[in-house]
Amino acid sequence: MSVDDCMLVDLPKITDQRGNLTFIERGKGVMFDIRRVYYLYDIPSGVSRGGHGHKKLSQLMIATSGSFDVLLDDGRKQRTVHLNRPFQGLYICPMIWRELDNFSSGSICLVLASDMYDESDYYRNYSEFCKAAEVS
Ligand code: TYD
């Protein structure tokens, strides 16, 4: 797995005079079965979130409000993606270390995940992650 396997996915956007609507349906635009949804909100300015990698979990991350940066790192290569469009999702494949920062005021980060929360799926130590990424 590499940061090049992570990609921006365009989501449907329905616009009329009342505003915009975006929807996500199983099997359309999301390359995994969604088993969990969570969101980050009330994020104080200047903080960083994430700071971990996942062994098996796939995610789709959406800035439903505001903007933030997502640093992606596969142990060899790094890439930063700026998320600021509620109709675009960032697909993050397994074995990617991620750090989220530069949250704008009032921003919301919505995450669709391929599995239930499982602490044993996390790498929370960067050097352990890099060691595991080297052999994977
Ligand atoms: P963490 O994954 O460290 O958050 P972030 O990716 O935003 O830095 O999770 C923070 C805390 O919330 C941690 O104690 C685990 C808990 N948590 C759950 O209980 N369920 C979940 O679905 C998630 C994502 C986290």
Image (cartoon, rainbow, N blue to C red):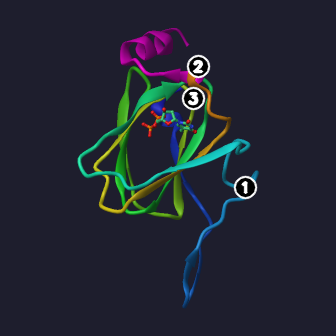
Question: Where does the image place residue 25, in percent across and percent down from the top left?
Answer: 73, 58
Q: Residue at x 62, y 33 (%)?
A: 117
- The residue nearer to you, when weighing 116 against 6, is 116
**Earlier-in-chain disc, 1 versus 2:** 1
**Earlier-in-chain disc, 2 versus 3:** 3
Q: Quadrant of the C terminus?
A: top right
Kindly report the distance in space between the C-alpha atoms of the residues bearing marks 1 and 2.
29 Å
- The residue nearer to you, when weighing 45 against 72, is 45
- The residue nearer to you, when weighing 17 against 50, is 50
Label 3: how many residues lie within 10 Å, few (<14), some (14-19) or many (20+)?
many
Q: In the image, which residues are magenta?
A: 120-136
Give the amino acid at mark 2. Answer: Ser
Residue 57 included in the magenta stretch of the image: no
Kindly report the distance in space between the C-alpha atoms of the residues bearing marks 2 and 3.
14 Å
Give the amino acid at mark 1. Answer: Lys
Label 1: how many residues lie within 10 Å, few (<14), some (14-19) or many (20+)?
few
Question: Where does the image place residue 68, in percent across and percent down from the top left?
Answer: 35, 52
User: Which secondary structure is most common in the magenta stretch?
Assistant: helix
Decide if ligand 1 comes within 8 Å of the CB at mark 2.
no
Task: Name the residue tied to disc 1.
Answer: 28
Kindly report the distance in space between the C-alpha atoms of the residues bearing marks 3 and 1.
20 Å
Residue 86 to residue 133: above or below: below
Q: Which mark is residue 94?
A: 3
